[in-house]
Amino acid sequence: MRKTIMTMLLSLAVVTVMAQGKAVVEKMSAAGLKLDATTNMEEVEQQYKKNQAQWDKAIEWLSTHDLKGIEKGRHPIEGSTLTASVEDTQNASVENRQSESHYHHIDLQVVVRGVEGFYLLDHATSEPRDKWREDVIHYNFDVEKATFRVGHAGTAFLFFPSDWHVAKVQTPVADQTLRVIVIKLDYVE
């Protein structure tokens, strides 16, 4: 009997966590955004459960602002400690971009206009290039072992501390001009 109750409680906990990840996907979808297929949904579920108010504020901001028309620059997200960084920029060759990961934050990166290229680094063949500085560290990596992803307008990427990545990398399309919005969510241990 005790084993059955424990199994039922564990099943209920798993279903609750999965429902939280689904809630994020649904809220992002309602905002006109789609999470990239590489998104670690287990991390989404855990982090959303630990910091739902902050995630909800970020998604609400994305869904209530004209992302194409808003002025570039930093925009405080009302009712939170978050800031949305609106960037009009260019993709560049991978050699001219920095690899990174964050220890205390999750990068929520939304492609608003254009096409953005990303590399996700292979942990087995990559290594830290320097020590942590504030919340960022950079890596030496083999581009041949990294996974290349392309985000079109409406694509959202979530980079957790375990997601070593390179953003704004040149893509096969002719025009490398893009607009992205970056919100750094707190990573909760």
Image (cartoon, rainbow, N blue to C red):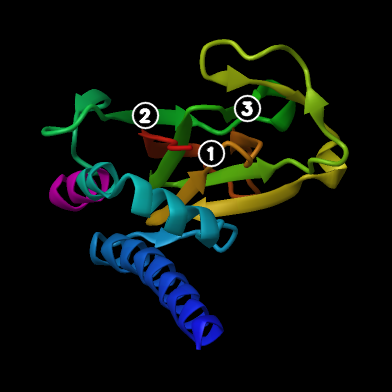
Q: Are marks 3 and 1 in contact (CB under 8 Å)?
A: no
Q: Which residues are magenta?
A: 58-66
Q: Main structural element of the magenta stretch: helix, strand or loop? A: helix
Residue 187 in the image, given as x and y percentages of width and height: 44, 36
Q: Which residue is mark 1?
A: 176
> Which SS class for mark 2?
strand
Q: Can you tell which of label 3 and label 1 is closer to the viewer?
A: 3
Q: Which residue is mark 2?
A: 87
Nearer the observer, 76 or 81: 81
Q: CA distance from mark 2 to mark 1?
A: 13 Å
Question: Would you say 44 lies left or right of 102 here?
Answer: left
Dividing the picture into quarters, in which one does residue 163 lie? top right
Residue 107 in the image, given as x and y percentages of width and height: 46, 37
Dividing the picture into quarters, in which one does residue 174 lie? top right
State which tag comes first along the sequence, 3 or 1.
Answer: 3
State which tag comes first along the sequence, 3 or 2.
Answer: 2
Q: Which residue is mark 3?
A: 100
Query: Disc 3 residue type?
Result: Glu
Q: CA distance from mark 3 to mark 2?
A: 18 Å
Q: Can you tell which of label 3 and label 2 is closer to the viewer?
A: 3
Say which mark, if any, is on residue 151: none
